[in-house]
Amino acid sequence: MFYTIFKLPRSGSTRLAKYLDRAAGVGCVHEILNGVNGADYDAEIRRRLDANPDACSSMGFSLNPFRHAIETVDFFDPRPLVSAYGGGLAISLTRQNILHQAVSYWLSRQLKMWPGDADAARAPALKAYVEQGGVEVPVASIRKICRRLSSQNDALLEFSRAFAGHHGLDHMEITYEGLYQAPNPDLQRLESGLGVTLDPELVAPSGKVLPPLEDWIANYDQ
């Protein structure tokens, strides 16, 4: 199966790509156009896919189309790969709790790093910074990010469906919540769609450096 994952920031795509890439017979190039702008996207995607091992029954990539100002679904033709891998699937990955997504995004930008797992680089410094009360989440900024992410989530779903329809692919909508919060029905749907079995650690709680988001948004007026 050849697949694409269209996603937005702070939607769990990095973790998902890591576990897909770990699964037997599966390859996933995360943020496949990272560092590329204004080039021949089709050729660059093929080059980066070719740089990965070809002993896979399922291969795909993740991409935030808005980051690269991609507006049309013909930026890449997946049909040769769909034929080579025996099927095609376009996946849209969104986050239902926009407020949590916005707070996570704002913190990652404010701290100049992604608030990742406890063993991430700079984790001790980040933890100390947080415990010293060095971060305050501004209501006006969060509201602005919420509006933008809400609009982009709708646009992402439309783009993903259009991409699937244009290239004759199946389409699947999955969510951060459906993958990482029990019960996790989207995980089973994803495994079934790709015909793979993922590591059960995918849905296990991860040790985050930052406190639960509720601690940051307790006084936020939605």
Image (tube, grey):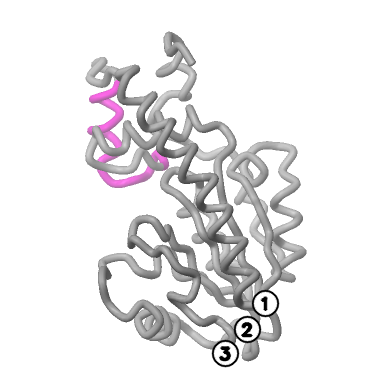
In the structure shown, which secondary structural element does the residue marked by tag 1 occupy?
loop
Query: Badge 1: how crowded within 10 Å, few (<14), some, or many (20+)?
Result: some
* Residue 14 picture location, percent across and down: 46, 54
Part of the protein shown in magenta: 117-130
| Residue found at the far top of this picture | 219
Q: Is residue 47 above or below residue 156?
A: below
Which quadrant: the N terminus? bottom right
Magenta residue check for 126: yes
Q: Residue at x 61, y 50 (%)?
A: 201
Residue on which disc 2 sits: 82
Q: Is residue 58 above or below residue 106?
A: below
Work out whether residue 143 or residue 7 is closer to the camera in this orientation and state it.
143
Amino acid type for the residue under numbered disc 3: Pro
Q: Are marks 1 and 3 in contact (CB under 8 Å)?
A: no
Q: Is residue 154 left or right of residue 70?
A: right
In the structure shown, which secondary structural element does the residue marked by tag 2 occupy?
helix
- Of labels 1 and 2, the one closer to you: 1
Q: Which mark is residue 168?
A: 1
Residue on which disc 3 sits: 80
- Of labels 1 and 3, the one closer to you: 1
